[in-house]
Image (cartoon, coloured by chain):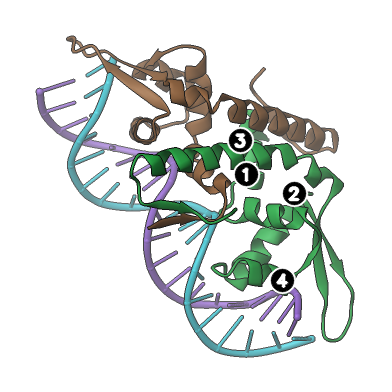
Chain colours: A green, B brown, C purple, D cyan
Amino acid sequence: MKQYNLGIEATLEILGGKWKALIVCLLMSGKKRTSELERLIPDISQKVLIQQLRELERDGIVGRINYHQMPPKVEYYVTEYGITANKIIDIMCSWGRENIRLRKSQGEDIELLEK
Amino acid sequence: MKQYNLGIEATLEILGGKWKALIVCLLMSGKKRTSELERLIPDISQKVLIQQLRELERDGIVGRINYHQMPPKVEYYVTEYGITANKIIDIMCSWGRENIRLRKSQGEDIELLEK
DNA sequence: CCGTATCCTAGAAGATACTG
DNA sequence: CAGTATCTTCTAGGATACGG
């Protein structure tokens, strides 16, 4: 039996991966092909991208469409359930932005790339 | 120069540690001694507890009071700044609770201990 | 173009023993 | 009671090469 002390533990398991929130964020604006995601996240390796996508898929957050074409074409999108996590992504993003702004104003050598 | 793609990355650095959200959650209801926290989180080792507290302290989320008594007495509390993270903790908790409830209703052998 | 298979590494987390 | 010092374990993430 899997046990959690707090709901937040489940949230972190699902969205706490290094790139997951970023991936979901990007997919929120519309479905994307694997290669688009690779381009949008230059620092991620293909293996890790696929891995994180599989986990998000397993957890019901993103869906996958295989067009069975040659050459292959696959698209990922945020599921209806995944959209319920939107509020979390938003608030974590805004608190983090504010946190970075604050630290920057205190002299830390730090930068936020998103606009 | 430290760079972030999204604000959420900063949030996860600060609150994404395995026990941090739980610790902050517990401290939200009032300041606690080290030994109380150890008792409230039976599965954490002392080393890791202190470590997570130090990081939360460094990040301005919790504060530490040393009473300089013998035997020693130290208390931890959520700082004013830490309280701004309250909304995040709350929403991550409630989404996670709902996620667990959902998975449980789908037959997963899973349990949420918090009430 | 998309994905898998290996191997590898850095850092988080844990166990244990010890001090003021 | 609170904290440090080691040593060990574990695993997410990364590098690389290959296959449908």
Marks 3 and 2 belong to one chain: yes
Residue A2 or A12: which is nearer the viewer? A12
The residue carrying mark 3 is A9
Q: Which residue is mark 2?
A: A59
Dot 3 or dot 2: first in sequence order is 3
Across and down, in percent, residue A21 comes to 64, 50
Q: Nearer the viewer, residue B70 or A72?
A: A72
**Percent of width and height locating residue A25:** 69, 52
Q: State if disc 1 and disc 2 touch (CB < 8 Å).
A: yes
* Left or right of D16, for residue B89: right
Marks 4 and 2 sit apart, C-alpha to C-alpha, by: 22 Å
* Whether residue A5 can be seen here: no
Mark-to-mark CA distance, 4 and 1: 25 Å
Give how far apart the Cα atoms at labels 4 and 3 are: 31 Å
Q: Residues within 10 Å of mark 2 (few under 14, many from 20)?
A: some
Per the model, the C-alpha gap separating discs 2 and 1 is 10 Å
Q: Are marks 1 and 3 on the same chain?
A: yes
Judged from the image, the secondary structure of the residue bearing numbered disc 4 is: helix
